[in-house]
Image (cartoon, rainbow, N blue to C red):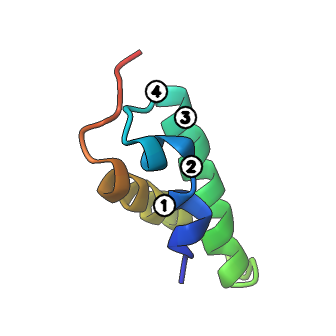
Amino acid sequence: MLSAKKITNHSAVINKRPITQAERHGLIAKAAYYIAEEREFRGDCDLHDWLKAEAKIDRIFGSRTLRD
């Protein structure tokens, strides 16, 4: 399971500040990597990993994403 600690130590979570679209994208990419790592990079699941990571980041940040 994706360790919340790997994502929730981001300064925006700690400081409860909004994140930019670029930060959101970077966090999703990092979370997707961790998800793939947990399944030992088996299979062709890039899109599934990305969508799962996107949902996770959106749950953490909710409506605190800034529009660029």
Between the residue at mark 2 and the residue at mark 1, the CA separation in whole angstroms equals: 15 Å
In the depicted structure, whether residue 38 falls above or below residue 49: below
On screen, 68 above or below 55? Answer: above
**Residue pictured at 62% horizontal, 50% vertical:** 29
Residue 53 is labelled as: 1
Q: Which amino acid does label 4 sit on?
A: Thr
Q: Are there few (<14), some (14-19), or many (20+) residues within 10 Å of tag 1?
A: many
Q: Distance between the residues labelled 4 and 2?
A: 13 Å
- Quadrant of the rendered image containing residue 35: bottom right
Q: Earlier in the sequence, mark 4 or mark 2?
A: 2
Report the residue marked by disc 2.
10
| Residue mark closest to the camera, 1 vs 4 | 4
* Amino acid type indicated by mark 3: Glu
For numbered disc 2, what is the local secondary structure? loop
| Nearer the camera: disc 3 or disc 1 | 3
Q: What element carries label 4?
A: loop
* Residue at image mark 3: 23
Picture coordinates of residue 1 (x, y %)? 53, 84
Q: Is residue 58 above or below residue 43?
A: above
Seen as rendered, the residue at the extreme top is 68
- The residue that label 4 is drawn on is 20
Q: Are the two marked residues, 3 and 4, in contact with CB atoms closer than 8 angstroms? A: yes
Query: Regarding mark 1 in the picture, which secondary structure is present there?
Result: helix
Whichever of callouts 2 and 3 sits on the residue coming sooner in the sequence is 2
Measure the C-alpha gap from mark 1 to mark 4.
Answer: 17 Å
